[in-house]
Amino acid sequence: MNKTTIILAEDEPALGQIIKESLETRNFDVLLCENGEKAFEVYKAESPELLVLDVMMPKKDGFTLAKDIRAIDDTIPIIFLTAKSQTQDVVEGFTIGGNDYLKKPFSMEELIVRINNLLNRTKLQKTSDILKIGNFTFNFPKQLLQYNNEDAVQLTHREAHLLFHLIKNKNQVLDRSLILNKLWGSDDFFNARSMDVFITKLRKKLIKDETIQIINVRGFGYKLIC
């Protein structure tokens, strides 16, 4: 069985080794890096399928590293590990391209579940879905949104997956808790705030077609109307 390669960037040696050994017992190949600069070098030299990044690291912090990687790769899944729990920190992590956010301390079982969920979503992304919504064409695998014959707009990984589920449930309520657990890993307050930010971004990207609306169904979730 082929192993999934993961880069783990963690500057606490003991914690890094524990995570590495735990993941390796689950058939992951883990490349442990002690700082952000080293992780970026290893990323460019190897072909990892997922990144687990500590936010607070020397030389290059996790957020800066994620920005550098997203400049050249907008599809690889990224999980942030951090002791920071302020709402603005969580939102920043998702805004710059993170796919999940795990607060320390955490259980290894929870990390493994989140890793597997992201890897499964990545496989879904590689399907050949080309979706139509109003005057927009949405290329889900390439994360491109095109209005009529204009140049396509590149969506982030999370924007693309959120739009995919909204379109698949067009004119129906997309359950808030369900989609938070599916795309963010949990339906806590911080993730809910982050999803609100992404909904606002999608509304702005779809504004050219007046027949399309994403409405907030209070207490339930969101509905994409077309």
Image: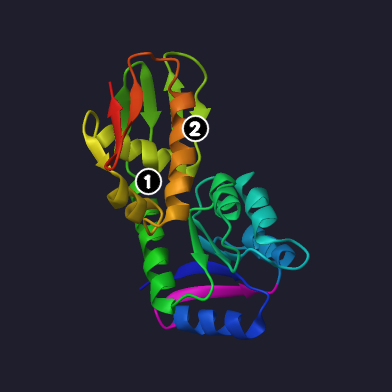
Is any part of residue 98 visible from this angle?
Answer: yes
Q: Is residue 181 above or below residue 222?
A: below
| Residue at the (31%, 24%) spot, across then down | 132
Amino acid type of the residue tagged 2 in the rendering: Lys
Please give the residue where the numbered disc 1 appears in the rendered image: 125
Q: Place residue 158 in its image quadrant.
A: top left
Magenta stretch: includes residue 140: no
The colour scheme is rainbow
Residue 49 visible in the snapshot = no
Q: Residue beneath label 2, please?
A: 201
Magenta residue span: 25-34
* 7 relative position to 127: left or right: right
Q: CA distance from mark 1 to mark 2?
A: 20 Å
Residue 168 lies, in percent from the top left, at: 25, 36
Give the image location of residue 140, x and y in percent: 38, 36
SS of the residue at dot 2?
Answer: helix
- Label 1: element kind: helix
